[in-house]
Each structure stands twice: as C-alpha cells, then as structure tokens.
Image (tube, helix red, strand yellow):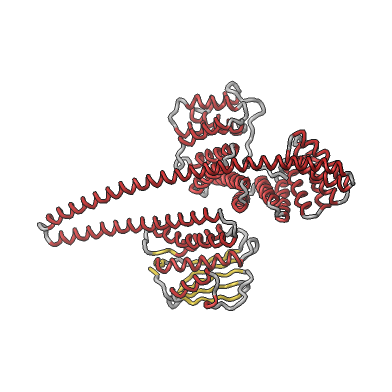
C-alpha cells in the first residue's frame, strides 16, 4: 500500500460563512468600521483569511490589508501581511510567489521579539520546500523553527497562550516526522511522532492524537512492523471515534488495520475491517482509496481460496486505477489477478495481468529512480551550500579573532602605559594610598580572570558539542548497529562533560558544580538519547544539592553516565520499567550514589580483572581514582552502589 506523506495541520479553524468575502462584504465592512484603527483592521483581515483556509476569495481581504499596511512602518504588521500572502499562494499552488512572500516576512521578523511568528514563517517555508522536493531544506528550516519554540517561555497562569504554544509544537513535530518518514529515516520519524503524541496527550486533543497515531502506524506498516502498527491503529480508531472524526479518516484506519491483519495471516478479522472501509469508499469520491481497499480484499479472498471473488475485486480495482493512472494500485491489482487466474487455471489471463504488473512495477521503479537521483542532486547542492557557508563563517571568525587580538594588544599596551604613569604618581602618595591602589589592581585582575575562566568553560563546552555533532553526522553513514551504538555512547560521555562546563560558565561559582541541577540535566539528556519516557517509566529520583569541585564532578559524571546508560539500554522496559537514582552525603564524609532498575540483573559476580566492556572498565578506573567502593548486586533487578571517599566538596 502506498503511504502518502503530507503536512497534517492539526489545528481546526472555524470558517466564517460560506459566501465569498470581499471588501464590499458586510462582515468585512463591519470589521473595517469597528476595528478602531488600521493596525487592528490588518490583524482581523489576515485572521479571517486564515480561518477561511486562504481560499480564492481571501485574496481581496489580503489586498485590503496590504493597502492599509502601506501607511504603517510597523514591521510586525507588514510581516503578518506577507506571511498571509505566502500562505495564500501556497494553498493555491503558486509556490514561487509563496516562497517570495514568506522570505519577505522572514526578513522583517526578529526571532527574539516575535518568536511565534518567526516559527510560523519557517514552518510555512518548510511546506513550500517539501512541495518543491527539497526535503533537506525543509527539514533544516523546521529544525530552526523547533529551536525558536524551545526558547519561548509563557507564564503558567496564561493557559490560552500555553495551549497555543503546545499546539504549534504538535504541528511542528508531526510535520518533521512526516518529512523524516519521506526520506526513510525511521528512528527520527518515530522520535518526532512520539514528541507530537506526548504534547497532544497533554492537551487531551483526541482528534490530534488519532491523526498522529495513524501517521506513526503508516510508518510501521511501511517498515513491516505489523503487530506494532495494529496495536497503534486500534488506539487511533478509538480516539478518532471519541473525537467524532470524519468517516473518511476512520475508513482509512479500518483499511490499514485490515492490511496489518492480512500481513499477519489473520484473514477473517481482516475481511471484517476491509468491508467497513469499502462500504464507505464505494460511496465517496476517493476512488483510489476504494481501489486500494479492493486489492486488499482480493488478496484476502485469494488466501481463503475464494478465487472468483478475488478476481472480481481485483478487476474492478484495476479498472479504477487505470482510469486514474494510479501506478501502484495497477501494479498490486495486476499481481493479485495474476495469482487468482493462475489458481483457477486461466493461464493466459494470468500471463496478461502479470505483464501489466511488471509494466507498472518498471514504471514505478523508473519514477522512484528519477526521484532518488533528483533527491541526491538536491542533497549534494545543499551540502555544498552548507560547506560554503561554513567556510564563510570560518573566515569571518578568523577575521573577528584577528580584530579582537589587535584590540587586546592595544588594550594591554594602554594598560601598561597607564600602570607606568600611575606608578610615578603613587611614589608621591602615602603608604595607605599605595595599599588602596594595589587592592584595586587585585580586584581588577580577579574580575578579568573570572571572565577569562568563564569564556574558557564556554569554549570547551562548544568544542565538546561540535565533537558530538561530528560523531552524530558520522553515525548516519554507518550501517553497523554496534558502531552506531558505540558512537552514541561516546556522545553521551561527551554530553556528561559538556554539562559540567555549561554549568560552570552559566553560574557564579566558577570552580564548583551544583549536583542537583547537573544530575537532573544529565538524566534528562540520557532519557532523550535512549527514548525513555518519564511518563511511562517509574522514575524514583532523590538528589541532594552539594557543590563539588570540577576534579570530582567530571569522573563522577562519567560514572553516572555509564551506569544510567547501562540501565536504560539493558535494564528497563520502556513501557513498564522502574528506575531509581540516589545521590546524597553520608555521615563520615562520604558520598553515596545508587542506581537501580528492575531488569534481569547480572549473571555473575563483578570481577574488575575480567571486564570486557569499555564502559565497565571506565567505571572501574574512575572509581579507583575517587577511592570509591563499587558494588553490583541483584535486588529485583540490578542495583549498583558507589561510596566515594576521595572528593572535594565546597561549602
């Protein structure tokens, strides 16, 4: 079955009336006369156009808004007008004009002042790029939109704005998942579908939940994960039914459930579901959906030995598909007929339909090859442009560093001259004045050193992030799962160190790490890395807040990274797992770390001399450095206890 990918706009709009809205329309005249000023009129006119899904009649509204916008210097209002024009041309098929207006809107919009509008503009541009076949560009600009939305903070009391923000994230994550699905990046697609689903669950929007579940199930069907797809589809149809979704949407879900059951050999229940889908599609305008459903039922009839019924359904499906030039349905119907005619001894008809199947298959293959070649060419051009941009940024960075160095040398020379002149002045003052000046110099030096130390930590953190990104890029070119896993482990180790330097330059204490914030950030990062949903896994976290010096924090962070990674990879069921983490100070100047899960535990006594795992070796070496007692034991799962004696803690 062909899986169609598209941007699913999950937010429903209320349409204002059924008649065309023009500047002479009483509703519009009323808005213009009651808005009070041009700014409010512009906002109201563009909003009405959006609520009407930018249909043809919306153009006159936007032109009216544009004429009002000529009188204002307000960049936000002008950006809103261009954004609305971009969406209008996108919905009406003029991608060139859509891209032009969206670029103009983006140039006028500051992401720091108007983050939500900037994010919306990027999302619309992503839709344009997808329709043009520029999937890498589409993904890149949607990731920029995601980055902007992450920076938006809204007061907890403003529930309406918080819901709007969550809804935008749902749209964004679902769209990103669809794009990754289109380029066959299974893991990224699943990750973003799950993020979208998590946000939709928070809002309890059952219609959105049903749509996202259906999209994820399509992905699983495409990758032959039929049982998983079936489980999710049954959830989807429950949510769609409760939300009173359209009959066509429910019929699609019934068809996909039938396909999953058929692939799993459960023909009788598959027949019941496909009959429900066909009952709807045969009375609707979605002729190809009807034809696809007939092919599925034909295959079910064939498996049950009812060959004439299989022939009847497949012949009708072929006629519809030939009329609409639906190659994939022609291919599937031809194959179904070939098998059915062969089973009934009608070999000439079987051969004829097998040729139809092969002809359609070759056409699809050629079309897909053309698309792949085009996609590769676009990817090459995109990578080339990215490389050129990196070189340009590098040149600018070098130029900026050179200017900074010149300025720094000038400042140093100036400081030296000032110090020299001031020393001559100090000779003529009393001893108390000399002491006062020395204290001032010491304070200045400490301030400079503090600034330099913060900058050093910042740069170390950035360099570690670059290394992690390079490893991530390298992993995408690897096919070996063990190599990918090793790179992922390395990225997590780098992340554990990066979080330390990030906290050092963000906080006032430049040599101390606050344990509560650090370990919480590390656990959150590892949950994201290994796909652990704290809403499903029973997380028992107990972290005391202490200030550790950096020489203790780095090895301790690496040890915790390895222990938690091991629990998430081998010890926790992502649906029903239990995980515990404790960090506290014991009496007797000792620190305790305890990590536990409800997994299978260990099969043998932990012997450092026989360790083969790099991660366990790292834990053992770092434990020795901290003079720590390390203990592994089975306690309804694996429980690892680390008691540290050699460390530095700041008050």
**What residue is at 14 percent from the left and 53 percent from the top?**
421
Quarter occupied by the N terminus: top right
User: In the displayed image of the protein, which residue is found farthest to the top?
Assistant: 24
For the C terminus, the quadrant is: bottom left
Image position, residue 279 (x, y; %)? 81, 41
Residue 30 falls in image quadrant: top right
Residue 625 x/y as whole percent: 43, 74
User: At which x and y percent is residue 329?
Assistant: 75, 41
Q: Is residue 163 visible?
A: no
Residue at 61 percent of width and 53 percent of height: 187
Q: Is residue 333 left or right of residue 427?
A: right
Q: Is residue 411 left or right of residue 494?
A: left
Residue 33 x, y percent position in the rendering: 53, 24
On the question of residue 280 being in view, the answer is yes
189 sits left or right of 238 in the view: left
Q: Nearer the viewer, residue 37 or 304?
A: 304
């Amino acid at each position: 079955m062909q899986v169609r990918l598209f941007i699913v706009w999950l937010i429903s709009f209320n349409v204002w009336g059924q008649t065309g809205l023009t500047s002479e329309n009483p509703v519009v005249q009323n808005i213009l006369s009651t808005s009070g000023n041009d700014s409010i009129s512009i906002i109201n006119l563009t909003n009405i156009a959006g609520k009407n899904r930018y249909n043809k009649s919306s153009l006159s509204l936007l032109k009216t808004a544009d004429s009002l916008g000529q009188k204002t210097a307000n960049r936000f209002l002008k950006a809103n007008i261009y954004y609305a024009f971009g969406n209008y041309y996108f919905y009406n098929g003029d991608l060139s004009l859509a891209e032009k207006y969206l670029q103009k809107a983006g140039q006028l919009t500051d992401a720091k002042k108007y983050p939500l509008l900037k994010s919306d503009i990027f999302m619309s541009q992503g839709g344009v790029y997808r329709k043009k076949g520029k999937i890498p560009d589409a993904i890149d600009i949607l990731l920029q939109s995601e980055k902007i939305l992450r920076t938006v903070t809204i007061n907890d009391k403003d529930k309406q704005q918080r819901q709007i923000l969550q809804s935008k994230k749902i749209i964004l994550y679902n769209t990103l998942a669809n794009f990754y699905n289109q380029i066959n990046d299974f893991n990224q697609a699943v990750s973003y579908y799950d993020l979208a689903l998590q946000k939709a669950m928070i809002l309890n929007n059952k219609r959105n939940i049903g749509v996202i579940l259906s999209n994820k199930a399509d992905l699983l069907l495409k990758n032959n994960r039929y049982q998983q797809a079936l489980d999710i589809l049954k959830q989807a149809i429950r949510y769609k039914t409760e939300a009173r979704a359209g009959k066509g949407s429910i019929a699609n879900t019934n068809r996909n459930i039938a396909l999953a059951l058929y692939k799993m050999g459960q023909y009788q229940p598959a027949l019941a579901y496909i009959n429900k889908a066909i009952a709807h599609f045969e009375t609707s305008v979605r002729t190809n959906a009807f034809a696809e459903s007939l092919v599925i039922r034909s295959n079910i009839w064939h498996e049950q030995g009812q060959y004439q019924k299989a022939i009847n359904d497949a012949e009708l499906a072929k006629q519809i598909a030939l009329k609409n030039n639906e190659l994939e349905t022609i291919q599937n119907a031809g194959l179904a007929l070939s098998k059915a005619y062969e089973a009934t001894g009608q070999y000439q008809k079987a051969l004829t339909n097998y040729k139809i199947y092969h002809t359609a298959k070759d056409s699809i293959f050629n079309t897909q090859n053309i698309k792949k070649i085009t996609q590769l060419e676009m990817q090459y051009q995109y990578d080339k442009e990215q490389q050129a941009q990196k070189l340009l940024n590098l040149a600018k960075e070098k130029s900026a560093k050179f200017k900074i160095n010149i300025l720094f040398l000038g400042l140093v020379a100036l400081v030296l001259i000032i110090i020299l002149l001031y020393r001559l002045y100090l000779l003529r003052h009393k001893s108390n004045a000399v002491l006062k000046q020395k204290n001032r110099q010491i304070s200045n030096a400490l301030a400079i050193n503090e600034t330099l130390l913060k900058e050093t930590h910042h740069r170390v953190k950035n360099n570690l992030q670059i290394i992690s990104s390079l490893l991530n890029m390298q992993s995408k070119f690897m096919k070996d799962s063990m190599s990918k896993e090793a790179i992922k482990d390395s990225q997590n180790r780098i992340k554990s160190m990066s979080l330390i330097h990030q906290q050092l330059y963000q906080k006032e204490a430049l040599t101390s790490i606050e344990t509560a914030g650090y370990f919480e950030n590390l656990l959150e990062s590892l949950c994201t890395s290994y796909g652990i949903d704290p809403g499903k896994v029973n997380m028992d976290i107990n972290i005391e807040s202490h200030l550790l010096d950096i020489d203790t924090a780095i090895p301790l962070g690496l040890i915790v990274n390895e222990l938690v990674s091991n629990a998430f990879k081998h010890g926790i069921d992502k649906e029903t797992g239990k995980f515990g983490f404790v960090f506290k100070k014991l009496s007797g100047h000792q620190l305790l770390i305890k990590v536990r899960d409800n997994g299978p535990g260990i099969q043998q006594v932990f012997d450092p001399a026989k360790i083969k795992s790099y991660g366990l070796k790292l834990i053992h070496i770092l434990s020795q450095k901290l003079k720590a007692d390390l203990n592994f034991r089975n306690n309804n799962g694996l429980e690892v206890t680390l008691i540290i004696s050699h460390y530095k803690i700041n008050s």
